[in-house]
Image (cartoon, rainbow, N blue to C red):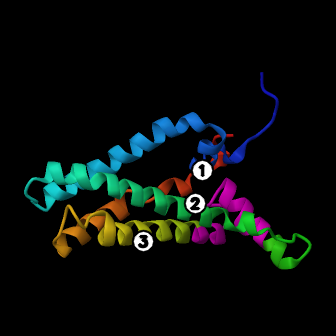
Amino acid sequence: MQTGEKHYNIIFPIWLLWLFPPAWLFVLPANYLIDWAVLRLTMRRLRIVDARAKARTAAWRAWLVGLGADFVGTLAMFLPNLLGTDPSTTFGRWMMDNIVNAVSYNPFQTGAAFAYTAACLLLSAALIYLGNSRWGLRKALPQARERKAAAAALAVFTAPYLFYLPTQWFF
C-alpha cells in the first residue's frame, strides 16, 4: 500500500546508514573489498614484490582513510542544510533553489548544484590521496613513487561518485 510519502534522501549513504543501521554490515565490508582490490591491482601493475601481503596490510589503513574522507565530503554536501538559509532574502531563496534542494534531489538540476557536488567529490578525493600518501600506505610502500601512485589510484577509483546519484529517480 502506497501512502504518497516520499523520502528523497534515503539513498544517500549517510541517510541510509542513519535510518537503516544494519546497512553498515554490508557497506563497510564492501568498501573494504573495493579498497583492497584497487590496492592489489595497482600494486600488481606497479610490479611490487609481495603485492598480495602488502595490499592486505595496507588495505585497513586505506579503508580508514577512505571512510574519513567520505565522511568529510558528505558533511560538506550537507553543510548548506546545516547552516540554514533564510528564504526571505534573495540569496537565501537562490541557495534553497540552486544548492540545497538541487544537491539533495538532483545534482544535475542546476549548474551551481553540479559544481558544488563536484567540489565535495574533489575534496573527498584529495583527502583520500593525501591521507594515503602520507599515512595509509607509508608502511606497506616505503618508496614515495609507489606510494603516490597507489594513493592516486585509490583517490580516482574510490572517490564517492554516489554524490552524483539523483535521488528523485528512485522516489
The quadrant where residue 42 appears = bottom left
| Percent of width and height locating residue 63 | 37, 54
Left or right: residue 38 compared with residue 51: right
Q: Amino acid at mark 3?
A: Ala
Secondary structure category for the residue under label 2: helix
Q: Name the residue carrying label 1.
A: 14
Q: Which mark is residue 167?
A: none
Q: Name the residue carrying label 2.
A: 74
First in residue order: circle 3 vs circle 1: 1
- Image quarter of the N terminus: top right
First in residue order: circle 2 vs circle 1: 1
First in residue order: circle 3 vs circle 2: 2
Distance from disc 2 to disc 1, alpha carbons, whole Å, reads 7 Å
Q: Name the residue carrying label 3.
A: 126
Q: Is residue 130 magenta?
A: no
| Percent of width and height locating residue 169 | 64, 44
Q: Which residues are magenta?
A: 95-116
Left or right: residue 157 compared with residue 28: left
Q: Amino acid at mark 1?
A: Ile
Secondary structure category for the residue under label 3: helix
Name which residue lies at 32% across and 72% down.
134
Classed neighbour count for the residue bearing mark 1: other residues with Cα under 10 Å, few (<14), some (14–19), many (≥20) = some
Distance from disc 3 to disc 1, alpha carbons, whole Å, reads 20 Å
The quadrant where residue 87 appears = bottom right
Q: Amino acid at mark 2?
A: Thr
